[in-house]
Amino acid sequence: MGKGCEAEGLAGRTFAFGFFDQVAGQLAGRLKIRSARHLARPLAALLVGGMAKSGVLDDLQGKRVAIVPVPTAKSRKRERGIDHTRLVAKELARIMGWGLCEVLERKNEGMQRGRTKAERLKQAKGLFALKSGKKWAFDTVKSEHDTVNAAGDTVFDTVILYDDITTTGATLAECVKALEKSGVKDVRCVVLAKTR
């Protein structure tokens, strides 16, 4: 965990399945850009296998875990017709028996794609927050039709923050800050691919 994530506080708590220029990154791109929703389940299974093999899951046995997808910009969801991070996060929750908590929101539509490292770090500052008036809840996803409400008390031990790709770690770092500000003590990051 932690290799390649430059943003402050992420070293040692970020797992990346592979690199962007490898299969994981290519498949993540297909899901994201081509709206290939059928890839969500196999991508989640790849992540689970990679996490198990690397020992990331070892200390989570017996703990209540919630997965939080990094929010996709609304304009991107409209453009693509899907929320690619939510789809994979939902499959991760189903496979692992974790809760799916969609409690983060973007404060604006800032896009990281195509930006320099300095621009990414600056733009991500304060970009994410806990949804207004929402508190944490834990609910295990049981079927594709289940939804999780975000009202109630914190009743889990660990939050897994999921995003498809990380470059500088700026987006992950800002989401971690928002989650920790809300009282979460153990936040870990999982991504399909990182850039080199």
Image (cartoon, helix red, strand yellow):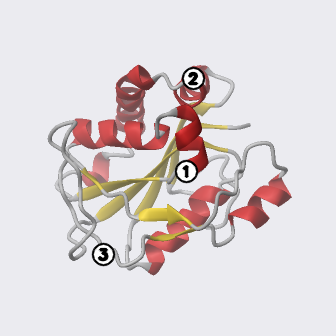
Q: Residue at horizontal 18%, vertical 57%?
A: 139
Q: Nearer the viewer, residue 82 or 182?
A: 82
Residue under label 2, please give it: 34
Q: Are the residues tagged 1 and 3 within 8 Å (C-beta)?
A: no
Whichever of callouts 3 and 2 sits on the residue coming sooner in the sequence is 2
Query: Does residue 13 appear in this view?
Result: yes
Left or right of residue 104: residue 133: left
Q: Residue at horizontal 16%, vertical 55%?
A: 62
Q: Which mark is residue 51?
A: none
Q: Are the residues tagged 3 and 2 within 8 Å (C-beta)?
A: no
Neighbour tally class for label 2: few under 14, some 14-19, many 20 plus, Cα within 10 Å: few
Q: Position of residue 17 (x, y in %)?
A: 51, 34
Q: Tell us which disc is closer to us: 1 or 2.
A: 1
Neighbour tally class for label 1: few under 14, some 14-19, many 20 plus, Cα within 10 Å: few
Give the quarter of the image for residue 107.
Answer: bottom right
Q: Nearer the viewer, residue 163 or 158?
A: 163
Q: Which mark is residue 74?
A: 1
Instruction: Identify the amino acid type marked 2.
Output: Arg
Q: Residue at horizontal 29%, vertical 54%?
A: 59
Instruction: Identify the amino acid type marked 3.
Output: Lys
Residue under label 3, please give it: 135
